[in-house]
């Protein structure tokens, strides 16, 4: 913290700032208008991800407005001296995937980006949160942001999760319990054995979706799993400096006996594969459950929104989703497009074929993930199954590029939001884990992934 | 970016009672491709306002000729989801200066305050009554007095909270960069000490 003054928000110094083509142009325009420079170009990294095509990335972008936005990013980065991992660059990818994989995201940092899923970086024990474009401009100009101390919440997942249950199910479970606004105003710390035993990539999936319950940030104390993940990454401290840094990072964990404004605890054994049925991420359930009825809702005031939501989804109250036919499968996004996600999907679909009539897109989170998938032969497994492995980007998570789910169609998606029209006008989204998405791709229906795990390695 | 000053507003209001209105509804992602802050108003609530043939959907509040004004009144958890500031720009560009709800998502609230749109948090009961009043009498005037932190309409009034720093910014048309640029020397020193 640079400055605290009574009656004013704190000026918080930002160690790492990530930018992309969609929420930065107006910020750079603001700098130009005020005649300001970027405060410290070494602390800002840019990539193109939100509206880039996921096919033929070596060709100029066809859609004029998207092309203009990416070209604007190029020009701004050049004019202001900011490093850009542009289309075709071996480090290009979704902003929240490339930060960690390049070792730009390190424990104890303050990290911001003009994107609400910046909470992803909290998996390393960071204060990481999404900001608006005016704030992007502030950070570019001053390397600081004005903040008030948020309330703190601890969410503990005790015990162990079952087979066929993955970190996406944990976070969908938590959000279904506390609602899409249950953590607004809080920063969340995830703790407990079920969290500790997760890999870094799985932890990132959890922190990523903190914003889906309203929390701007979600973090996990760094440990040996964290340090091993970071070791040897491109921009991480190397050699002696790494070990020195680890000593410092070890001091970051929350003190035993620390108090929080709110503490929630869930039993890992109760978590099963999850799926959403509505139009916000809080409208989720165990994949074997039935959709609630309006009468079962806790608050009567929510009944109208609930009914409207089911009408949009074309679903009936009180019915099961298991066995419901789907049209599209999207495996991608900053939530679930890392190499472990692709490996999980590949291990389930190996030697199998997608159901007829279902379209399956696998969109890797970064160029490095894509290359690694090819190196491991995952691309061959996907191809044989009829899955399309595309080029990296945000893709059908938000449908800014051509990857849109058509009106009325159902998509089981590993992304983070099931809002109306999120994946394309009138599209209908079921959020689920990569395993559940892979299982649905094979059967063409909403399927309990645990039915398949005996086939997996 | 400094905007116009906000002190007191008296206006009719537009009711959108839905809860959990996310920023994808306020401005769908496909309209985020502009590189300026202007012009987003025409796509505000695009998919609730127009059908797939671009015909206005009659029963949506923005298409209802009875409703107009600078105040938007909406259900709880307004502005959840994406951090896109375009949502605040669209609301401003359309002509709203105040959004009233019983609960706002954090990032949207900041974005609104940074763009001269005042988010007014009221109690559930105040909100319910306000929505009912506007729906039954669309010409009801709503008064939003920032100086005294008070919202009133017809037969009810309530005080609202606002961060004193943000209040000062809104009343004077200042923004955060003005404040942060004054700290330049301290920040330089901090940066050097932490690199």
Image (cartoon, coloured by chain):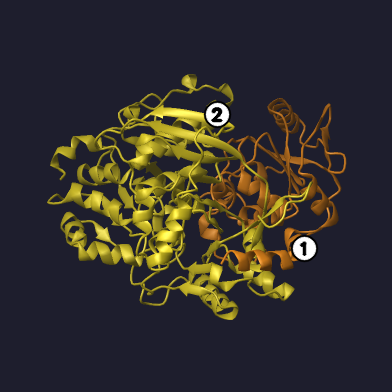
Chain colours: A yellow, B orange
Whether residue B129 is situated above or below residue B51 in the rendered picture: above
Q: Check the image and name the residue furthest to the top.
A: A295
Residue B193, image x, y percentages: 61, 65
Q: CA distance from mark 2 to mark 1?
A: 44 Å
Q: Is residue B39 visible?
A: no
Who is closer to the viewer here, A62 or A93?
A93
Whether residue A51 is situated above or below residue A58 in the rendered picture: above
Q: Is residue B27 visible?
A: yes
Which of the chains bears the disc numbered 2?
A
Q: In the image, is A16 to the left or to the right of A325?
A: right
Q: Secondary structure at mark 1?
A: helix
Mark in front: 2 vs 1: 1
Who is closer to the viewer here, B52 or A17?
A17
| Quarter of the image where one finds residue A436 | top left
Q: Secondary structure at mark 2?
A: helix
Going 66% across and 41% down the picture, which residue do you hit?
A: B61
Q: Which mark is residue A142?
A: none
Residue A399, image x, y percentages: 44, 56
- Whether labels 2 and 1 share one chain: no
Q: Dot 2 surroundings within 10 Å: few (below 14), some, or many (20 or more)?
A: few
Q: Which mark is residue B178?
A: 1
Residue under numbered circle 2: A304
Q: Check the image and name the residue furthest to the bottom.
A: A79
| Quarter of the image where one finds residue A44 | bottom right
Going 28% across and 32% down the picture, which residue do you hit?
A: A322
Who is closer to the viewer here, A206 or B7?
A206
Who is closer to the viewer here, A159 or A137?
A159
């Amino acid at each position: 913290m640079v400055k605290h003054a009574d009656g004013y928000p704190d000026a918080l110094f930002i160690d790492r700032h990530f930018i992309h083509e969609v929420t930065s142009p107006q910020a750079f325009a603001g700098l130009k208008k005020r005649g300001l420079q970027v405060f410290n170009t070494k602390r800002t990294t840019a990539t193109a991800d939100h509206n880039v095509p996921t096919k033929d990335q070596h060709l100029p972008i066809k859609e004029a407005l998207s092309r203009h936005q990416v070209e604007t990013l190029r020009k701004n980065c050049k004019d202001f001296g900011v490093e850009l991992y542009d289309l075709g660059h071996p480090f290009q990818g979704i902003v929240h995937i490339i930060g960690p994989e390049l070792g730009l995201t390190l424990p104890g940092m303050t990290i911001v980006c003009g994107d609400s899923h910046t909470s992803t970086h909290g998996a390393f024990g960071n204060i990481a949160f999404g900001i608006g474009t005016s704030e992007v401009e502030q950070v570019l100009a001053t390397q600081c942001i004005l903040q008030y101390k948020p309330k703190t919440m601890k969410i503990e997942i005790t015990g162990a999760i079952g087979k066929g249950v993955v970190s996406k199910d944990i976070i969908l479970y938590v959000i279904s319990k506390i609602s899409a606004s249950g953590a607004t105003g809080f920063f969340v710390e995830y703790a407990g054995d079920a969290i500790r035993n997760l890999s870094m990539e799985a932890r990132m999936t959890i922190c990523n979706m903190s914003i889906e319950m309203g929390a701007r940030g979600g973090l996990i104390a760094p440990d040996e799993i964290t340090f091993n993940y970071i070791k040897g990454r491109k921009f991480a401290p190397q050699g002696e400096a790494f070990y020195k840094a680890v000593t410092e990072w070890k001091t970051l964990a929350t003190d035993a006996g620390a108090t929080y404004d709110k503490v929630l605890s869930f039993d890992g054994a109760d978590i099963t594969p999850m799926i959403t049925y509505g139009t916000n991420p809080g409208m989720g359930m165990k994949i074997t459950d039935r959709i609630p009825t309006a009468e079962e809702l806790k608050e009567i005031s929510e009944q109208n929104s609930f009914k409207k939501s089911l009408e949009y989804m074309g679903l009936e109250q009180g019915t099961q989703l298991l066995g419901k036919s789907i049209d599209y499968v999207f495996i991608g996004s900053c939530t679930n497009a890392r190499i472990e996600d692709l490996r999980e999907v590949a291990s389930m679909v190996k030697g199998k074929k997608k159901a007829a009539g279902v379209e399956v897109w696998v969109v890797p989170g970064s160029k490095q993930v894509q290359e690694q998938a090819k190196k491991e032969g995952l691309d061959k497994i996907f191809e044989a199954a009829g899955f399309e492995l595309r080029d990296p980007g945000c893709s059908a998570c938000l449908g800014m590029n051509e990857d849109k789910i058509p009106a009325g169609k159902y998509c089981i998606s590993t992304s983070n939001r099931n809002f109306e029209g999120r994946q394309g006008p009138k599209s209908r989204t079921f959020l689920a884990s990569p395993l559940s998405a892979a299982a649905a791709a094979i059967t063409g229906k909403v399927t309990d992934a645990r039915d398949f795990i005996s086939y997996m390695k | 970016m400094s905007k116009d000053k906000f002190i007191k507003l008296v206006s009719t209001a537009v009711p959108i009672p839905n809860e959990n209105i996310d920023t994808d509804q306020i401005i769908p992602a496909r309209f985020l491709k502009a590189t300026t802050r202007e012009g987003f108003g025409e796509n505000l609530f695009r998919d609730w306002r127009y059908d797939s043939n671009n015909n206005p959907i009659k029963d949506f509040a923005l298409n209802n000729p009875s409703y107009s004004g600078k105040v938007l009144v909406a259900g709880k958890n307004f502005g959840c989801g994406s951090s896109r500031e375009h949502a605040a720009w669209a609301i401003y560009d359309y002509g709203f200066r105040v959004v009233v709800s019983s609960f706002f998502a954090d990032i949207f609230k900041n974005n609104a305050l940074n763009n001269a749109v005042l988010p007014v948090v009221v109690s559930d009961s105040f909100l319910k009554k306000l929505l009912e009043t506007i729906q039954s009498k669309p010409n009801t005037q709503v008064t939003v007095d920032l100086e005294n932190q008070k919202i009133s309409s017809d037969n009810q009034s309530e005080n609202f909270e606002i961060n004193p720093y943000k209040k000062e910014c809104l009343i004077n048309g200042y923004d955060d960069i003005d404040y942060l640029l004054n700290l330049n020397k301290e920040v330089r020193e901090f940066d050097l000490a932490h690199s």
